[in-house]
Every structure is written in C-alpha cells, then in structure tokens.
Image (cartoon, helix red, strand yellow):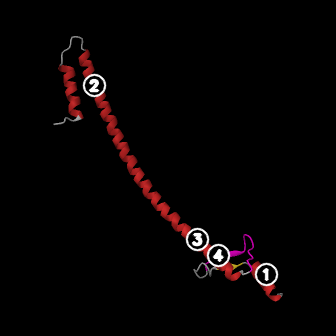
C-alpha cells in the first residue's frame, strides 16, 4: 500500500516528537523534512490548479481563434465576390475602362443585388453621353 503525502508528513511529525536523540538534531531534521514536504505538496497543488486554469483559458482562446479564422475566411470570400461584382459592373458599364478615382462608383441599397446596386457617377454618365453624341 502506498502512503499519501499527508500520511507521510503526519508520520514524520510524530517521529520528530517521539524519537530520542542526544542533541535533538535528528528531531529537528525530521521536523524540517515534514515542513519541506508540506511546502512542496502545497506548491505542486497550486501549480496543478494554475495549469488547469491555463488549460481552460487556452481552450477558450483556441475556440475563439477557430471562430475568428472562419470569420476571416468568410470575409475574404465576401470581398472576392464584391470585387468580382465591381469588375462585372465596370466591364458592363465602362467598356472603355474609364474609372474616375475615389468617386466613380457609389453604392445605394436599391435592390439588394450588389451588381445592380452599383450606380455610375454623374461624371462617367456625362462622359459616356458626350462620347455617344460625338463619336
């Protein structure tokens, strides 16, 4: 049968009191051993608790990271679809490739369709009409 740490400490404490040595050094050494064993057991127990907490936090962080990675991938796919929608619009409505910086396209929630919701800027419309009038 294997004794527990508490049983060993208790036995050491009994020994430190009941054993007889001429100078008492043996008694002091056994008592010190019981104290140190108690300290080590407490440190190990605290370490085990901290490790449990760390493991739980790591599991939560890992789950959060998986969710964030999935969200990032979803957003990348959405960006790709939107870029494709813009490219399709530019191909359909600006065949000459004209794109005015910063204000060429505006979005307006009209239909819910990302391609149909894109509207050409007034400058592009005017430019197109001028080209059609003066070929």
Name the N-terminal-most of marks 1 and 3: 3
Q: CA distance from mark 3 to mark 4?
A: 10 Å
Name the N-terminal-most of marks 3 and 4: 3
Tag 1 secondary structure: helix
Q: CA distance from mark 4 to mark 1?
A: 19 Å
Tag 3 secondary structure: helix
Name the N-terminal-most of marks 2 and 1: 2
x, y percent for residue 116:
62, 82
Quarter of the image with the C terminus in it: bottom right
x, y percent for residue 133:
82, 88
Q: Which residues are magenta?
A: 96-109
**C-beta proximity under 8 Å, tags 3 and 2:** no
Q: Which residue is mark 4?
A: 86
Q: Which residue is mark 2?
A: 33
Name the N-terminal-most of marks 2 and 4: 2
Tag 4 secondary structure: helix
Tag 2 secondary structure: helix
> Can you name the residue that lies furthest to the top here?
22
């Amino acid at each position: 049968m294997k004794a527990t740490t508490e049983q060993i400490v208790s036995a050491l404490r009994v020994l430190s009191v009941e054993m007889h040595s001429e100078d008492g050094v043996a008694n002091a050494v056994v008592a010190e051993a019981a104290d140190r064993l108690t300290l080590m057991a407490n440190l190990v127990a605290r370490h085990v608790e901290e490790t449990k907490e760390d493991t739980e936090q790591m599991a939560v962080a890992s789950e959060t990271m998986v969710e964030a990675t999935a969200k990032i991938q979803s957003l990348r796919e959405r960006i790709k679809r939107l870029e494709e929608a813009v490219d399709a619009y530019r191909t359909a409505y600006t065949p000459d490739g004209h794109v005015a910086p910063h204000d060429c396209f505006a979005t307006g929630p009209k239909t819910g369709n990302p391609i149909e919701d894109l509207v050409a800027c007034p400058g592009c419309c005017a430019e197109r009409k001028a080209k059609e009038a003066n070929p």
